[in-house]
Amino acid sequence: GQNIDQPTEMTATEGAIVQINCTYQTSGFNGLFWYQQHAGEAPTFLSYNVLDGLEEKGRFSSFLSRSKGYSYLLLKELQMKDSASYLCAVMDSNYQLIWGAGTKLIIKP
Amino acid sequence: IAGITQAPTSQILAAGRRMTLRCTQDMRHNAMYWYRQDLGLGLRLIHYSNTAGTTGKGEVPDGYSVSRANTDDFPLTLASAVPSQTSVYFCASSGSGTGELFFGEGSRLTVL
């Protein structure tokens, strides 16, 4: 079956760096997405990786290793507003998105 | 403001009643999706439409139906609601390219 694994919850300190991991096993691969979802709100797009390597976008970076079925989202200079759930999703060979359950990130002052 | 709109925002419904969740987008996106989100689970695809006039079943289609009469609208109907359909429902759309999804604000449905 298809499976996306990510930690259920993580805690970090304001101003610090946190890495949220995602491992996947899917039928084919056509890209990996990270979305941010604040409590009670809709998910919003953060990043897309289809080739191996690191994509940097401001304080957020996303890494992909297709051979290892692994990705991480790196958040630098954490702010209180970064408290949210982070969703990992993989597009399979049928171009359907398979979603992880999300990682709830708690930022402490 | 361009985007995707869902209605109602929240609804409490008696079991056995029929309910339609509305979804409208003004971005002229071809593909539209309905997901449900439950605590501890990832987003699960209910139905999708790749273009106006076509629809397909997702991972959890039972008890739900959709239609896509035009590009903008993609309503989701629960013919006879059951308590297990209590969830938050998200409508989403995507244009061409990477497949990035744009989500509506969600509809919180409680079936008693």
Image (tube, coloured by chain):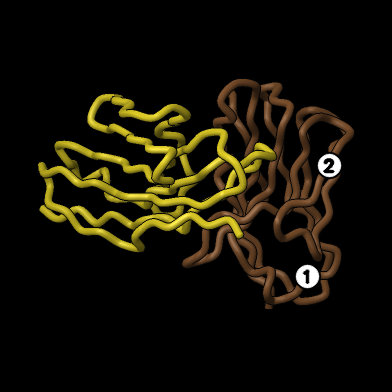
Chain colours: A yellow, B brown
1 or 2: mark nearer the eye = 2
- Which SS class for mark 1? loop
The amino acid marked with disc number 2 is Thr
Residue A22 placed where, x, y %?
38, 50
Quarter of the image that includes the N terminus of chain B: top right
Query: Is label 1 on the same chain as label 2?
Result: yes
| Nearer to us in this view, A40 or A29 | A29
Q: Which circle's residue, 1 or 2, is located before the other in the chain?
A: 2
Please state if A88 lies on the left or on the right of B26 as rendered: left
Q: Which residue is mark 1?
A: B81
Query: Outermost residue toward the front?
Result: A67
- Which SS class for mark 2? loop
Please state if A11 lies on the left or on the right of A38 as rendered: left
Which residue sits at x=33%, y=26%? A55
Residue B99 placed where, x, y %?
59, 30
* Crowd around label 1: few <14 · some 14–19 · many ≥20 (10 Å): many
Q: Which residue is mark 2?
A: B55
The amino acid marked with disc number 1 is Ala
| Nearer to us in this view, B28 or B111 | B28
Please state if B10 lies on the left or on the right of B58 as rendered: left
Q: Which mark is residue B19?
A: none
Which residue sits at x=56%, y=25%? B98
A49 shown above or below B111: above
Chain at tag 2: B
Q: What is the count of numbered marks?
A: 2
Residue B59 placed where, x, y %?
70, 57
Quarter of the image that includes the C terminus of chain B: bottom right
Which residue sits at x=15%, y=43%? A17
| Nearer to us in this view, A9 or B1 | A9
